[in-house]
Amino acid sequence: MFPGGQPDMARLLEQAQQMQQQLAAAQEQLAQEEVTGTAGGNLVSVTMTGQGEVTAVTIAPAAVDPDDVESLQDLIVAAFRDASRAVNELTASRMGPLAGGLGGGLGLPGL
């Protein structure tokens, strides 16, 4: 496993620092990226950053019916859910490879 049975602590610390830098860079990249969720055939759209901050909500005039406010509310909720799903997918694609590196990358049992 390790030469002499002991891990090289300096090497482990260096790898941990590199991983921390990579995670910080990935988080910064997520903050700069945007995704858009839609509902009702694009009647409602919600734009979020990769960190889940809402930056825009767009409602098409055709979605506004004063006699049917509940449908518009449902479309808004659905667009938020779609945008949130897109954020989760983006996060997994950016952070997944880094999280996978925790297992074998540091060579520590249980990580």
Image (spheres, rainbow, N blue to C red):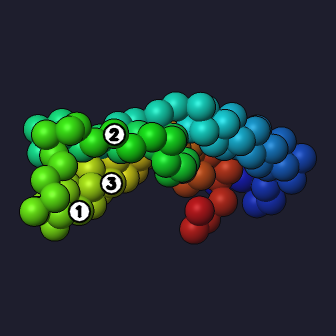
- The residues bearing labels 3 and 2 have C-alpha atoms spaced at a distance of 11 Å
Taking 96 as reference, is 17 left or right? right
Pick the residue in front: 5 or 39.
39
- The residues bearing labels 1 and 2 have C-alpha atoms spaced at a distance of 13 Å
User: Residue at 27% of width from left, 55% of height from top?
Assistant: 76
Residue placed under numbered mark 3 in the picture: 80
Residue 40 pos. (x, y %): 12, 45
User: Residue at 45% of width from left, 40% of height from top?
Assistant: 56
Q: Secondary structure at mark 2?
A: strand
Contact between marks 3 and 2 (CB within 8 A): the answer is: no
Identify residue type, mark 2: Thr
Task: For label 2, count other residues whose C-alpha is less than 10 Å away and answer few (under 14), some (14-19) or many (20+).
Answer: some
Task: For label 3, count other residues whose C-alpha is less than 10 Å away and answer few (under 14), some (14-19) or many (20+).
Answer: many
Pick the residue in front: 16 or 40.
40
Contact between marks 1 and 2 (CB within 8 A): the answer is: no
Pick the residue in front: 49 or 105.
49
Identify residue type, mark 1: Gln
Residue placed under numbered mark 2 in the picture: 58
- Dot 1 or dot 2: first in sequence order is 2
Question: In this rendering, is residue 77 above or below 33?
Answer: below
Residue placed under numbered mark 1 in the picture: 73
User: Residue at 10% of width from left, 62% of height from top?
Assistant: 68
